[in-house]
Amino acid sequence: MKKEYDVLIVGAGPGGIFSAYELCRANKGLKIAVFECGNPLQSRKCPIDGKKIKSCINCKTCAIMNGFGGAGAFSDGKYNITNQFGGTLYEYIGKQEALDLMRYVDQINLSHGGEGTKLYSTANTAIKKKCFENDLHLLDAQVRHLGTDINYIVLENLYQELKDQVDFYFRTYVSTVERADGGYLVRTEEDEFCGKTCIISVGRSGSKWMERVCGELEIPTKSNRVDIGVRVELPAAVFSHLTDELYESKIVYRTKQFEDLVRTFCMNPHGVVVNENTNGIVTVNGHSYEDPALHTDNTNFALLVSKHFSEPFKDSNGYGESIARLSNMLGGGVIVQRFGDLTRGRRSNAQRIAESYVIPTLSAQPGDLSLVIPKRILDGIIEMIYALDKIAPGTANDDTLLYGVEVKFYNMEVEIDRNLMTRYDGLYVIGDCSGVTHSLSHASASGIHVARHILERE
Ligand SMILES: Cc1cc2nc3c(=O)[nH]c(=O)nc-3n(C[C@H](O)[C@H](O)[C@H](O)COP(=O)(O)OP(=O)(O)OC[C@H]3O[C@@H](n4cnc5c(N)ncnc54)[C@H](O)[C@@H]3O)c2cc1C
């Protein structure tokens, strides 16, 4: 027996959650189902404890990437309110609308446990001038830092509010989405569900699935870029003048050697470096807590270079995956190297890491990143580290730790219109799986946008 709904939502990440939230808020009595292959929030637990289990054991669904809250559930909870990075939602819905929706999402976060958290801004800072003086470019943004702990509370509160109005199907993998009479049919391993409208929000972890579904439904797609680089970890004092004022600074540098753009990404003052598992490939990421009791002495951030392939090779993600696999092959997971070892052309070993003044917050395999990361990308990263050293002296110290590889995979771009709807009436693709967003705020805003479009048509 097929179960019937008004709206079917695939994926309970920010895109799925905020679309469900906005649909419920309208109080129109819509029957809504959310399918999530991962666990409810409280059951999401990564088995890596650093003692018995030190590296990824490839669980059936990754507790970090899948489950209520999506990929961002244990993230640093940085909601960037900006059109300068985090996605190109504004190209579809307009710049002002995109910013308004991000501010609206911010208000929802504040009213669900985020009140009291700080909103940082890059506007009119002396740091911007200092960056210019050194050929570095600080991007404009407002950043709400919820922190991993408050982010969790906000998600828990949202779930409590939604659970009586929405049917959540956890540990339920959607195998296919098909067109059916006047709507859509969602098949899971055991059941079938019908709905007038279907919102797909399967995130980055659902990228391969999304590709298949687009192929089956003949929805056009375009290849997207991939970002490759390292995560830098150094004493928090080195970056404190930036992080105290801005929390997160997105800085871009054009290398002298190749004129490639290298940028900082996901800055975590007093944070920790963590493993990330995307479709079985272990890469590196980072986060930090709002609670000072959970702060470390280190700050971490990524340095990334974008690569976009088009002809004759189109598979940008495949290229990133191969580099990540190489690091997994050599290091069994993530590799860590002292900057001083890298510039001297030697690998780091356990002794050199142990003698380092920067104590790593992630237990990674000491090794040699130059054997993994293509020369052009690595040269750019080294050049950027020296450039950052001019605005944050100490960045290029020998003991600065580099973890590799950090890869940001972007989904291919799905052809959607300004309502984020595919060529099929009532079938929406939102959040990171659309290739349009790649951040919490943009993914959440895209969820609100489609919910409002659905409500207008009700
Ligand atoms: C460690 C980490 C830290 C991050 N930190 C930040 C940050 O501080 N700020 C920021 O802006 N962004 C951050 N990001 C990125 C941010 O989390 C994502 O941009 C955001 O979560 C995208 O939301 P989404 O709803 O599109 O997808 P997701 O959050 O990925 O959610 C998609 C959901 O769909 C489910 N799913 C996938 N396929 C299926 C299927 N076939 N059937 C059923 N369910 C399925 C998945 O299990 C997942 O829960 C971080 C990401 C990671 C991994």
Image (cartoon, rainbow, N blue to C red):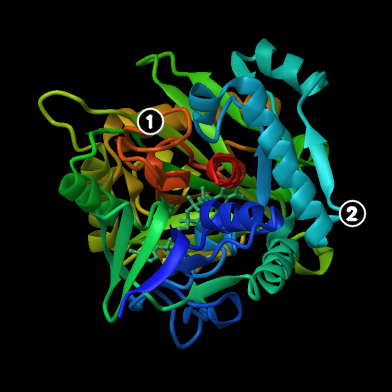
Say which element carries label 2. Answer: loop
Q: Give the farthest residue toward the bottom.
A: 52
Residue at horizontal 34 percent and vertical 57 percent from the top = 206
- Of residues 93 and 37, which is closer to you in this image? 93
Residue at horizontal 31 percent and vertical 64 percent from the top = 186
Mark 2 or 1: in front is 2
Q: Are marks 2 and 1 in contact (CB under 8 Å)?
A: no
Sequence-first disc among 2 and 1 = 2
Q: Position of residue 134 (x, y in %)?
A: 64, 15
- Left or right relative to 221: residue 90: right
Q: Which mark, by number, is residue 377?
A: none
- Left or right relative to 363: residue 166: right
Within-10-Å neighbours for mark 1: few <14, some 14–19, many 20+: some
Query: Could you tell me the amino acid type at mark 1?
Result: Ser
Question: What residue sits right under mark 2 in the picture?
Answer: 116
Q: Position of residue 84 (x, y in %)?
A: 59, 25
- Left or right relative to 379: residue 167: right
Question: What residue sits right under mark 1 in the picture?
Answer: 306
Residue at horizontal 62 percent and vertical 37 percent from the top = 395
